[in-house]
Amino acid sequence: MAEGYQTEDEQVEALKKWWNENGKSTLATIAIAVAGVFGYQGWQTQQQAEVDAASAIYQNLLAATNGQNGTVTVEQTATANHLADTLKADFPSSTYARFAALYKAKLAVNAEDLAAAEAELRWVLASGPSAEMSVQAKLRLARVLAAQQQYDDALAQLQGDSGTSASAYEEVKGDIYVAQGNSADAALAYQKALELDQQGTNPASNPLLTLKIQQLATQAAPAAQAQPAAAEPAANDSTDKEA
C-alpha cells in the first residue's frame, strides 16, 4: 500500500480512505466468520448434550428390566416401555431410539403381543437405520410375521442384502417353508444355511440347524418308502385282470 506515496502523511491518508471504503465490509466478514465458528461449536455442544441425554435414558431403560433371575415384572416392563417411547419421541433420529424400539419389540414378543412387536420393528425400518440394523430388524420382523402366519410378507422381508446374517436369513426361510408344509424348499434353505455356516476360516456351529435338517430327513423317509408300496397293489391288480 505504501508504494506510490512520497510522504508518511500521504500513506496515512491513503489508509484512511481505504478503511472508509472497505472497513465495514471487512468487519462484517470477520463477524460472520467468528459467528460461524462459535455457531458450529454451539451446535456440536448441543448435539453432544442430546447424545448424552439419549444415552442416559437408554441405560435407565436397560436397568429397568434388569430383574433377578431374568424375571421382569409388569411394572418394570411398563417403565421400560415408557422410557423407550420417550427416546422415540424426543430423539427420533438417534441410534438409541432405534435400539429402544428393538427392545420394545422384544418385550412385546415376550408378552405375546405380536402386533405391537411388528409395529416397533416397522418403525425401526422406516427410521433410516444403518445397513446392519436394517438386516437385523428385517430378520426379527420376518419371525414375527411368520408367527402371525403372514408367510408371504415374512419371506418378502428376507429378500435383498443380508450382510453377515445370510445364514440366519436362510434358516428363517426354512422355518417359514416348514410352517407352510413346503418340505422341499425348507430342506434347500436349511442346506444353504448350513453351507454358509461352513464358509470362512472359522466355520460356525449351529446344532439347532443340524437338528432341523435331520428332522426333515426323518419325516421324508417314511413318505419315500410308502410310494412303492402304494404302487404294488396296482401292478398285482393288472396281472390278475390279464389272467
Image (cartoon, rainbow, N blue to C red):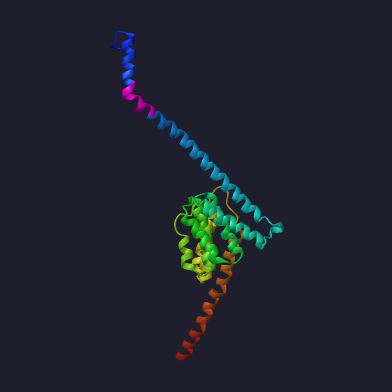
Q: Main secondary structure of the magenta part?
A: helix
Figure quadrant of residue 8: top left
Q: Position of residue 13 (x, y in %)?
A: 32, 15
Q: Nearer the viewer, residue 189 or 72?
A: 72
Looking at the image, residue 54 lies above or below residue 219: above
Extreme residue toward the right, this view: 68
Looking at the image, residue 104 lies above or below residue 10: below
Q: Where is residue 231 in the image (x, y as percent from the top left)?
A: 50, 81
Looking at the image, residue 20 lies above or below residue 38: above
Residue 105 vs residue 35: left or right? right
Q: Which of 134 and 38 is in front in this view?
A: 38
Question: Within the magenta stretch, is there residue 20?
Answer: yes
Question: Within the magenta stretch, is there residue 92?
Answer: no
What span is colored magenta in the figure?
Answer: 19-27
Whether residue 190 is visible: no
Going 54% across and 80% down the picture, which residue do you hit?
229
Extreme residue toward the left, this view: 4
